[in-house]
Image (spheres, rainbow, N blue to C red):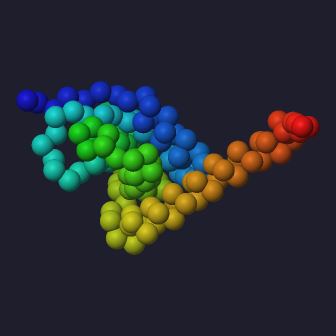
Amino acid sequence: MPIRYGKDEKIQHEVEFIVRKLGFRWVDVSRVVCVRSFGSGSRRTLARCYTMPKIMQVALGMKAYYIIEVISERFDKLSQEDKTKTLIHELMHIPGTMGGGFRHHGDHVTSKNVDEMYRKLVTNVWSDFYMSDKDKKSDYVEVKG
């Protein structure tokens, strides 16, 4: 059975959220497309990041785009934490220039750095949550009895 691909708006929104909350300012989300695949024979791969080779960019007269593919058969079985870490991992492959290259595994794209970015994301989300509640009146109501 051939592999089927389709754009995934839910993953797209998650990627945009991660980019915004982690301050990945170099990632132009208008040039990142998220795709879900079905039917992959890959045994261990959860997701992949692709880009356009320089020759295609020149021939087509366009800037590089990045595609994040989540492989449904494996990605969907992950916990939400692991899904988020997987998306962070794929985003970390995108270099600061967004010129069509990749940051490879090694010094930058590592489990340690992904875990650090995940902790930062969780901290930022909860910090924003509490900051937005700072000026709100409490819902606390004392019951006398």
Reply above or below: 10 against 119. above
Taking the spot 21% from the left edge, 33% from the top edge, the residue there is 38
Quadrant, the C terminus: top right
| Left or right of 22, for residue 5 | left
| Left or right of 24, for residue 69 | left
Taking the spot 37% from the left edge, 60% from the top edge, the residue there is 103
Task: Give the residue furthest to the front.
Answer: 145
Front residue of this view, candidates 91 and 111: 111
Taking the spot 50% from the left edge, 34% from the top edge, the residue there is 13
Count of marks, rendered view: 0
Reply above or below: 113 against 4. below
Residue 54 at x, y = what percent? 30, 47
| Left or right of 15, for residue 124 | right
Taking the spot 55% from the left edge, 41% from the top edge, the residue there is 17
Quadrant, the N terminus: top left
Residue 113 at x, y = what percent? 46, 66
Front residue of this view, candidates 36 and 132: 132
Residue 63 at x, y = what percent? 41, 40
Q: Is residue 131 visible?
A: yes
Instruction: Please tell me in which quadrant of the rendered image residue 66 appears.
Output: top left
Reply above or below: 75 against 102. above
Task: Give the residue furthest to the left.
Answer: 1
Q: Is residue 30 visible?
A: no
